[in-house]
Image: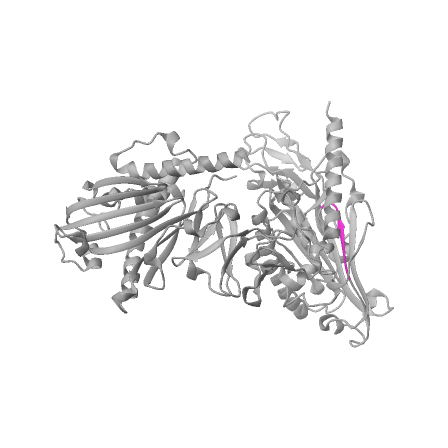
Amino acid sequence: MNNFLKNVWYVAGWADEVAPGQMLARQICGEHVVLFRDQSGKPCALVDRCPHRFAPLSMGTLCDGGKSIQCGYHGLRFDGGGQCVHNPHGDGRIPAAAVVRAFPVVERWSLLWIWMGEPAKADAATIPSFPFLDPDHFVVGKDKMEIDADYVLESDNILDLSHIQYLHPGTLGSGTAGEGRTVVTQEGNTVWSRRFIRDEILPTFLYQVLGLPEGAPCDRWLDVRWDAPSLMYLQADIGLAGRPREESMQNSQVHLFTPATEGKTHYFYGMGMPKAIGPHAQEIVDRNVGGLRAPFLHEDKPMVEAQQRAIGSEGFWTLKPVLLDVDAPAVRARRVLEQMLAAESAAAGSV
Amino acid sequence: MTSYPRNAWYVAAMHDELPAGSLLARTFLDDPVVLFRDASGAPRALQDRCPHRFAPLSAGSLCDGGNSVQCRYHGLQFQGDGPCSHNPHGPIPKAATVRAYPVRECARLVWIWMGDPALADDSRIPDYSAVTTAHEDATIRGHLPTACEAMLLVDNILDLSHVDYLHPTSLGGGGLHHVKPVVADPAPDQMKISWLSSGETAPPALAMHLRDPAAPTDQWTEVTWTAPTTMLLSVGATLVGEPREDGFVALNLHLATPETTGRTHYWYWSSRNCAIDPQANAMIRSVVENVFRNEDKPMLEAQQQRMGTAGLWDLNPVLLAHDAGAVRCRRKLEAICRTEQAEFILELP
């Protein structure tokens, strides 16, 4: 039994990863899941394993425009709720046990959200808010990456952006990015990390991306909101030094991590800009998201994966990590996650 | 995970996978084995591990025309029945013996006995000579190691209702598999599942070999499983009331030997009494091998992946009516394993 939070919304994918008529097989919290859209376009998620001989349903075919999914081995069909609706063999009787587990799925903020716990507790209102990914009003740039590391190491990474000075000197960081001050606050189970860096000389890459005069001293605000399990909204604003924040170049991002299994993580990141900006908005977000790929792929990913290898199968706390000031937000988020896990296992134990 | 009996004959190789003068390393039931032919040409099998420093003997070389195998690391030599016959460094220590497994070559198949050599009974080797001695131009055969446990392969052959779904463009589409199968127990270690029909014309691929392609036929698909993991599948059609051998008969061996947990050696060996011709054979081979390699194998391996290390029953599979034959085979195999286990426990002091 793995130690992932169950009663929480996980990102299953970007909404456009599951096109009508197509199946997406993805491992989430150790479960093999197949995602598809039913005939009305509503996303569905089933355990990707036929209950007859355990073939992956994702190797089968969608029938009747998504009304059911047919196993590629012996042809049993299941609807989006997991019920077997067709047995082509013998008298066609459907065995009572011919049911696949279905997971609640919600499409919101250009993402598909999946609930791995008790379906009765799935409340879409508890999905954190990312209004800048609302496809009706924003253009959304999006990407994803597979990381061979625990998902919590990834929230550590985003909640402690002092690392950009050291890990991303030529791209996202600068010689003084590590000198900013970080303030951590907690509202319920939500953790905020707010970081302000004054009078920074940015790397050329950022001046180019932002369209600011090269070499000009800048102020930078990096505010991260964390919600369990590892859902982060990053507001990254950069403006000319001494000017108010409202005048800065403002950038709203998401960094969303979903455990595939122990030590493997799906990473979804993206940003949105108001459609009101005009026809160039899509080009801008695509360029910005594209620009993030190189540092994420060649700087963060290798470091986080190497961290995981160095940690091995040890627990994070059993290795007695040295704690620095900058770790306060990440440690706070870890504590909240641990409390939620403890509460969930206590509740499971009391049943 | 499924258990497999050790006191049983398993296929180790097709005859020509083991040419004289070569060492063949293969794992069966988790035991690493080295196979070779001795000076008389008889197959031999030793544990593939020198008792000195545990180097694989298969990395060494054959001496005296096959009468011994020499370890590559320090030069100890072992006879085909296990004892060390040469120590280049001094006298031969008593303990210098390798485990030897009984092996037999019967009708171009090499069989190995993985259990107690004293119990190895040649009469228990299934006779598959009708398939393995057929004409070369009517023979399709190969070795296809597959990352699934052997009983998933057995399920696959015993439940041919899957052909309409997994092989719709090649083997599927026939009406026969909608016929209710008849399950029989010809022997304690065998099961036979038959799909029979009478009065329908044969599908075109079969009908073209009949005297009157448009005439009504008797058709059959019959699988005989012999414990632990070999199957003979007979498929054919003949004009109603006529002997089977006057019609089209294809005999297909499906031979599985567990390799390690979740891995299986699989050999297919098919023959038929028509279309004995190199060109026709090449055409049929490309269809059949495409089905085995690109349809069955990926599905079986994906199934195993989804099952992980759990056994079939641990996962509470939904059972359909046509699974009856395959389920009874599993029950028989489980009984054989239980008996073997009980006998083993009785023997303990």
In the rendering, at what x and y percent does residue B94 appear?
64, 25
Q: Is residue B254 magenta?
A: no
Q: Nearer the viewer, residue A81 or B125?
A: A81
Say left or right for A317 vs B183.
left
Residue farthest right in this picture: B241
Residue at 65%, 59% in the rendered image: A74
In the rendering, at what x and y percent does residue A303 appear?
33, 43
In the rendering, at what x and y percent does residue B347 appear?
75, 27
In the rendering, at what x and y percent does residue A216 appear?
12, 53
Residue at 53%, 66% in the rendered image: A39
Q: Nearer the viewer, residue A295 or A282?
A: A282
Residue at 39%, 44% in the rendered image: A228
Total numbered circles: 0
The range drawn in magenta is B221-228
Residue at 74%, 63% in the rendered image: B178
Say left or right for A18 vs B95.
left
Q: Nearer the viewer, residue B216 or B266?
A: B216
Q: How is the image coloured?
A: one colour
Name the chief secondary structure element in magenta. Answer: strand
A336 relative to A11, above or below: above
In the rendered image, is residue A305 in sight? yes
Quarter occupied by residue A85? bottom right
Quadrant assignment for the N terminus of chain B? top right
Quarter occupied by residue A186? top left
Say left or right for B89 vs B41.
left
Quadrant assignment for the C terminus of chain B? top right
In the rendered image, is residue B65 in sight? no
B32 relative to B138, above or below: above
